[in-house]
Structures are given as structure tokens and as C-alpha cells.
Amino acid sequence: MLERLKKADPDGAQVLAEDLRLIWARSGSAMVDMLLRRAERAMAEGELELALEHLTAVTDHAPDFAEGHMLRATTLYQLDLYGPAMEELEQAIALNPNHFGALFGAGIISYETGQTEAAMTFFDAVEAIHPNFEQLSRLQQELDKEAGALDL
């Protein structure tokens, strides 16, 4: 699927990316999957602390489940806890180096914390896996402008 994702047109890429997300969201444990669903529901309802509790349980019970770390990172990011969010993203990437969502998240945090070079590296990694990733080209253009302005 990852090879097809690299070559897909934008519409096909969107379908493949969603299929990958669904695969990556399966932990193999009914309990962990239930906790993940509860966390997603809490996130959707803006109950970030509750979501974090569920996701901490997920990562405690399934430390090798990349998606648990990814969602925990998302929650921490929404709580403005960038350092812990980046640690979770690094764990997700270590477990699944093709996780374009985790790579993108790491790029966003790097960008927002002024680490432009690191952000570009993460965004390049996303592009290598998923060339049609939404929002990527706009952010890369912003980074290129900033890099050009710094070179002047």
C-alpha cells in the first residue's frame, strides 16, 4: 500500500492514506482498541484530560502500538505540551517509520518551536512517503520562504 501511495493521484492517495490509518489504528487487543475509541470520543468532545488518561492506559498496556503514541502526542499538543508531544511522536516514528501523520506532527512542532531545518526534514520525509499529503505543499512553501529570507 505504501508503494501505491507514492504513485497515486490525489484522490487515490486520500483513499490509500485512510486505509493505512485504519490498519494502523488496530492494536490487536480488544481492550486497547476500546480505550482508543474512548480517547477519540473524549478528544472529539474537547475532554482532553480524559483523553490523555485513556491514551496513557493505551501506551502503558501496548507500548509497541504506534497509533497510541500518535494520539497521545496529538492530545498533548492540544494541551500545549510540545515537549512531551514530541517525545510521543518520536516513539510513534520509531515504531512505524512510515507513519506520515507522526512525521507531519513532528514537523509542525519543530516549525512552531522555530526549528525550521528539522521541520523541513520531517516534511521531506512525509513527502517521500505520501506526496499528496494535505497541507504539506503550503507548509513547505512557507518554510522555503523563511529559509530564503534567512539567506538574504
Image: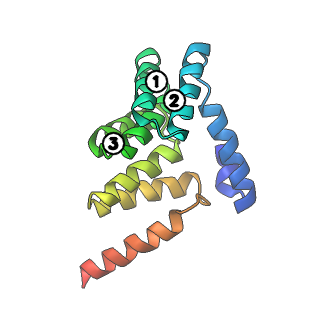
Q: Residue 90 falls in which quadrant of the image?
A: top left
Image coords of residue 129 (percent x, y): 56, 51
Q: Nearer the viewer, residue 104 or 97?
A: 104
Image coords of residue 110 (percent x, y): 32, 55
Q: Earlier in the sequence, mark 1 or mark 2?
A: 2
Q: Residues within 10 Å of mark 1 (few under 14, many from 20)?
A: many
Compared to residue 27, the image places residue 9 above or below, namely: below
Image coords of residue 63 (percent x, y): 43, 21
Image point (45%, 68%), residue name: 140
Compared to residue 137, the image places residue 126 above or below, namely: above
Q: Residue 40 falls in which quadrant of the image?
A: top right
Image point (26%, 61%), residue name: 114
Residue 2 visible in the picture: yes
User: Are the residues at dot 2 and dot 3 in contact (C-beta closer than 8 Å)?
Assistant: no
Instruction: Quote the CA–CA distance across marks 3 and 1.
Output: 19 Å
Residue 9 visible in the picture: no
Amino acid at dot 3: Met
Image coords of residue 111 (percent x, y): 34, 60
Residue marked by disc 2: 39
Residue marked by disc 3: 86
Q: Nearer the viewer, residue 110 or 39?
A: 39
User: Are the residues at dot 3 and dot 1 in contact (C-beta closer than 8 Å)?
Assistant: no
Question: Left of 148 or right of it: where is 62?
Answer: right
Compared to residue 29, the image places residue 102 above or below, namely: below
Q: Earlier in the sequence, mark 3 or mark 1?
A: 1
Residue marked by disc 1: 54
